[in-house]
Image (cartoon, helix red, strand yellow):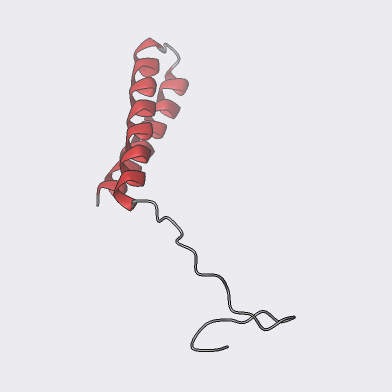
């Protein structure tokens, strides 16, 4: 190690300085949030159409977990 940088084991060279683009965390959160909201809409429509009580319960559980995930993302 030299000045906090790891050196190559075989030749001893320092790593190249590269600008690695950082993804915007807010942008990533908003895209994930929009995907989850679209899925929530799809499940809501599916719940309206469903007649089977057990299937309705499983859809409601999925909706609840999606809402929890969206709330965690917003925080």
- Please provide percent x and percent y for residue 66: 36, 37
Instruction: Tell me, yes or no, if residue 68 can be seen here.
Output: no
Using the image, determine if residue 39 lies above or below residue 27.
above
**Quarter-of-image position of residue 35:** top left
Q: Pick the residue in front: 3 or 43.
A: 3
Q: Pick the residue in front: 45 or 59.
A: 45
Using the image, determine if residue 10 lies above or below residue 53.
below
Identify the residue at image location x=54%, y=89%: 2
Q: Pick the residue in front: 49 or 69.
A: 69
Q: Pick the residue in front: 46 or 20.
A: 20
Of all residues, the one furthest to the right in this rendering is 10
- Please provide percent x and percent y for residue 73: 31, 47
Identify the residue at image location x=53%, y=82%: 5
- Please provide percent x and percent y for residue 4: 49, 85
**Quarter-of-image position of residue 64:** top left
Quarter holding the N terminus is bottom right
Using the image, determine if residue 23 lies above or below residue 17.
above
**Quarter-of-image position of residue 56:** top left
Instruction: Tell me, yes or no, if residue 25 can be seen here.
Output: yes
Using the image, determine if residue 15 lies above or below residue 27.
below
- Please provide percent x and percent y for residue 3: 49, 89
Identify the residue at image location x=37%, y=18%: 47
């Amino acid at each position: 190690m030299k000045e906090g940088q790891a050196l190559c084991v075989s030749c001893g060279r320092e790593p190249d300085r590269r600008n690695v683009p950082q993804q915007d965390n807010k942008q990533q959160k908003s895209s994930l949030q929009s995907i989850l909201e679209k899925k929530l809409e799809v499940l809501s429509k599916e719940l309206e159409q469903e007649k089977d009580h057990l299937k309705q319960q499983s859809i409601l559980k999925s909706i609840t977990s999606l809402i929890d995930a969206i709330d965690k993302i917003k925080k």
